[in-house]
Image: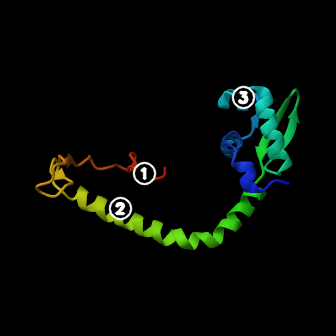
């Protein structure tokens, strides 16, 4: 059996897994979404099925594929010890960006933002505040 990394390192298989995260798909739907020929999609689905990433259910003349969570859970478990290296840095970056954004939003409307006086870079202008229906740039929604 191939490793999780070997299976997901191929870009078409990774794209198939990403589509199956959303919902189940037939081979034909995957062909259309990925713009790949049927034999190529079937080849990658066979590798994913053999590695335990997907399971197939016959539905009349179609074969519907869905993602199985177990291989991804084993990948998540493998990554767990490494999270301690990047989690504090990501948390610190988020705090820094929040402080920076809060400071910029407190500037008067139309006030220049950005480079220090004497810089060759032209100042940028503050963007309008995000409302509850408009997420901040980079915020997950």
In front: label 1 or label 3: 3
Quarter holding the N terminus? bottom right
- Horizontal side, residue 48 vs residue 23: left or right: right
- Residue 57, percent from left and from top: 86, 39
Q: Toward which corner of the image does residue 33 lie, by quadrant? A: top right
Q: Nearer the viewer, residue 45 or 19?
A: 45
Q: Residues within 10 Å of mark 1 (few under 14, many from 20)?
A: few
Image coordinates of residue 116 in percent, x first then y, are 16, 58
Q: Secondary structure at mark 1?
A: loop
Asked if residue 4 lies left or right of residue 120, the reply is right
Q: Which residue is mark 2?
A: 97
Q: Are marks 1 and 2 in contact (CB under 8 Å)?
A: yes
Residue 87 lies, in percent from the top left, at 52, 69
Q: Residue furthest left?
A: 118
Name the residue located 25 percent from the left edge and 56 percent from the top edge: 105
Report the residue marked by disc 1.
138
Above or below, 141 relative to 93:
above
> Which residue is depicted at the point 69% across and 39% down?
12
Q: Residues within 10 Å of mark 2 (few under 14, many from 20)?
A: few
Mark toward the start of the polypeptide (2 vs 3): 3
């Amino acid at each position: 059996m191939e490793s999780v990394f070997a299976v997901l390192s191929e870009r078409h298989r990774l794209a198939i897994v990403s589509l199956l995260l959303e919902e189940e798909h037939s081979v034909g739907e995957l062909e259309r979404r990925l713009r790949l020929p049927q034999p190529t999609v079937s080849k990658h689905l066979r590798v994913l099925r053999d590695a335990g990433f997907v399971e197939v259910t016959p539905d009349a003349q179609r074969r519907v594929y869905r993602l199985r969570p177990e291989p991804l859970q084993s990948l998540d478990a493998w990554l767990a010890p490494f999270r301690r290296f990047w989690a504090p840095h990501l948390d610190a970056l988020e705090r820094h960006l929040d402080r920076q954004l809060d400071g910029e939003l407190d500037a008067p409307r139309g006030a220049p933002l950005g480079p220090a006086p004497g810089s060759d870079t032209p100042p940028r202008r503050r963007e309008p505040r995000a409302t509850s229906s408009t997420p901040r740039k980079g915020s997950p929604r």
